Image: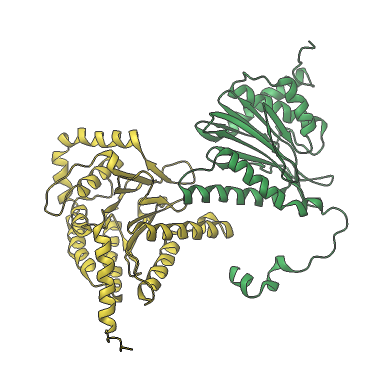
Chain colours: A green, B yellow
Amino acid sequence: MDFLGDHAPELLPGNRPLPEVRGAVEAPHGTTIVAATFEGGVVLAGDRRATMGNVIAQRDIEKVFPADEYAAVGIAGTAGLAVEMVKLFQLELEHFEKVEGVQLSLEGKANRLSTMIRGNLGMAMQGLAVVPLFTGWDVDRGKGRIFSYDITGGRSEEYGFAATGSGSVFARGALKKLYREDLTENQAATAVVQALYDAADDDSATGGPDLARRIYPIVTVITDAGFRRLAESEVSEIARAVHDGRLQQPDGPRAAVL
Amino acid sequence: MSTPFYVSPQQAMADRAEYARKGIARGRSVVVLQYTDGIVFVAENPSRALHKVSEIYDRIAFAAVGKYNEFENLRIGGVRYADLRGFTYHREDVTARGLANVYAQTLGTIFSSNAEKPYEVELIVAEVGPGPEDDQIYRLPHDGSIVDEHGSVAVGGNSDQIGNYLDQRHRDDMTLGEALKLAVESLSRDNNGGERSLTAEQLEVAVLDRTRPQQRKFKRILGSQLSRLLEEDAAATGSGADGDEAPDDAPTDTSAGASEDAPEAKEAPAKPAGKAKGAPKVDPDASADDEKK
């Protein structure tokens, strides 16, 4: 392919002139990602639904990936482009680590992702946006951190919790009431599953825990011990507990008024 | 203007090989050994920053001796090759064989081109497989030939002596501790048969560990972990005195074959003949190893 690119670039499929695009291109879109910090780490979770217009394109898509040993990225937006972007991002972090012998700083990783999103701006303008949430354990500062992005690559650090994607409004509302700074790892994981449940409750493009098909959200935890994806048994336990709670209180746990 | 002297091609190649070999022999050695759970790399290297052993890809590692700037260049080239391969196709499609071929091409071209001086490096590219029989170790001398190795390899310094020492004592079912101990023993023998003692600070140790749950199997063994492993060995030395002799008997047939052939292959002048001799040499070893399992 490189040979073809050098000698006859017009033969490569990507280089043919594109017909003019009218309206948004239909492609599967991933939806809601949430993150929350706790003492000693950060959790990042995502639902499993991909939608194409009003159709559910995929029920068990995976939208949360390890970026390297101490960082993870969750993506909302056009699934195909996002997965490719994550693959390139992972590669870049690994390549840097191998060539230089040290890992990039967490800020460095976040900035690099920012540049990659900005590179996708043209596509984003045609409706193929990719908006990730980036979390990681900052080895130098000894804490978990969250970075959110907009489609132009604008980066902002979030403190406590954050959400992105179509259900993010509802997820953020839920986390606002549930989040406390002294959560344990398990409580933080439960809180993000609650938030995803609320997002799925009010946003048609977000999928809730699918108990019948045993499809549960992906929950990942990053601590000073590195990245860990919760096993299906662990997530199913949390999801079932949340579900059982909702059978009593469909709107979820109540926060105090004052 | 004076007419340049005529130098026969044989003489020119022999001179270049001699130059490269001398450069390589000046440095300290690196040894690579297979053990039950993978492959261990041990180098005598007081520097923490300038590595002789490093990661190339998920299952592939690289070890080198000779001039640092030259092999560092090759290492970065290898990382680029592997990452590009893995990104274009799939992570599984990056193999030690492919990488060794690229290195062989590069070294061979540089060795035979008259414009450049030959690289004074000798490389090892190793890949850990799902089982010990799938492990691959390739040795790449300065002239661009490839030697497929099994069990144990030594490059740089007085590699012939160390290689013999290892061949006689190495077993495929060694634990990491045992393999490390053997490697350190072999490195601490000097030319005259005397022994120096090597401490954890003077060693650079890394493993390709097939039991690691992560995708990337390469791991450096540093500081406290290394001293702990070395101390374990020291403690076991007393009781393992008879253990030192036992392995001498067990693999006698294979190690004898290897040690007879090995120096011959290494002494062979760096010509295509060396490659032809090196390649079939390993085949009897390989089949013998397989039969043992």
Residue A215 visible somewhere in the drawing: no
Q: Which residue is painted at 29% across and 39% down in the image?
A: B201
Q: Which residue is painted at 63% across and 30% down in the image?
A: A236
Instruction: Pick out the residue farthest to the top.
Output: A258
In the image: residue B238, left or right of residue A250: left
Instruction: Where is residue B182? Give x, y as percent.
Output: 22, 46
Instruction: Where is residue A81? Give x, y as percent.
Output: 70, 52
Instruction: Where is residue A163? Give x, y as percent.
Output: 72, 33
Instruction: Pick out the residue farthest to the right.
Output: A22
Quarter the N terminus of chain B occupies: bottom left
Residue A256 visible somewhere in the drawing: yes
Tell me which corner region of the image, top left, top right, bottom left or bottom right, holds residue B95: bottom left
Q: Nearer the viewer, residue B188 or B272?
A: B188
Examine the rendered structure and indicate whether residue B260 appears above or below residue A182: below
In the image: residue A218, left or right of residue B199: right
Instruction: Pick out the residue farthest to the front.
Output: B1
Examine the rendered structure and indicate whether residue A232 appears above or below residue B55: above
Instruction: Where is residue B161? Give x, y as percent.
Output: 18, 57
